[in-house]
Image (spheres, rainbow, N blue to C red):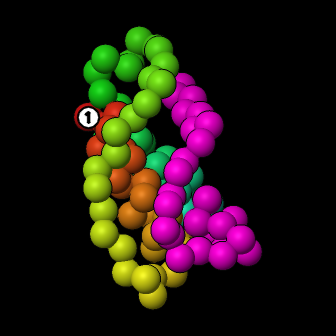
Amino acid sequence: MNIKLHIERLVLDGLPVTRAQSTILKQAVESELSRLVIEGGIHPELTSGGALAHVPGASMEFDPSARPAALGAQIAQAAYKGFGK
């Protein structure tokens, strides 16, 4: 099964990440989402294809001193709760 996940826009208001750190954060989100989908799959309603205009993610609290990679993984886990199994 091939899964194509396209995130057009991810709004992260108030996140303490500089422009230079945003690449690290993006890579961490992509990596963690890939891991979660491979290990946990996706919601059964999406297995036959389709698109979601909006995915409600879980709320999260972050440590302002956390590194971008850790924040990216946490963001991915919150987002996965909206479309994972």
Find residue 70 and report its horizontal and vertical position in percent.
Answer: 46, 73
Q: In this view, does 36 lie to the left or right of 24?
A: left
Query: 29 or 1, which is in the foreground?
Result: 29
Query: 9 or 1, which is in the foreground?
Result: 9
Q: In this view, does 59 lie to the left or right of 2?
A: left
Residue in the image at 29% along x and 21% along y: 44
Q: In this view, does 22 lie above or below 31?
A: below
Find residue 45 and report its horizontal and vertical position in percent.
Answer: 31, 17
Q: In this view, does 75 lie above or below 5?
A: below
Find residue 24 and report its horizontal and vertical position in percent.
Answer: 64, 69
Residue in the image at 28% along x and 56% along y: 59
Find residue 55 and report its horizontal and vertical position in percent.
Answer: 39, 35
Could you tell me if residue 35 is visible in this image? no
Residue in the image at 28% along x and 50% along y: 58
- Give the quadrant of residue 23: bottom right
Q: Is residue 14 above or below residue 35?
A: below
Residue in the image at 73% along x and 74% along y: 20
Q: Which residue lies furthest to the bottom in this view?
A: 65
Could you tell me if residue 21 is visible in this image? yes
Residue 53 part of the magenta segment: no
Q: In this view, does 67 lie to the left or right of 19?
A: left
Residue 6 part of the magenta segment: yes
Which secondary structure, mark 1?
A: loop
Q: Residue furthest right?
A: 20
Query: 57 or 42, which is in the foreground?
Result: 57
What stretch of residues is rendered in magenta? Answer: 1-26
- Give the quadrant of residue 64: bottom left
Q: Which amino acid does label 1 sit on?
A: Lys
Q: In this view, does 58 lie above or below 66?
A: above
Q: Mark 1 Cα within 10 Å, few/some/many (few <14, many 20+)? A: some
Residue holding disc 1: 85
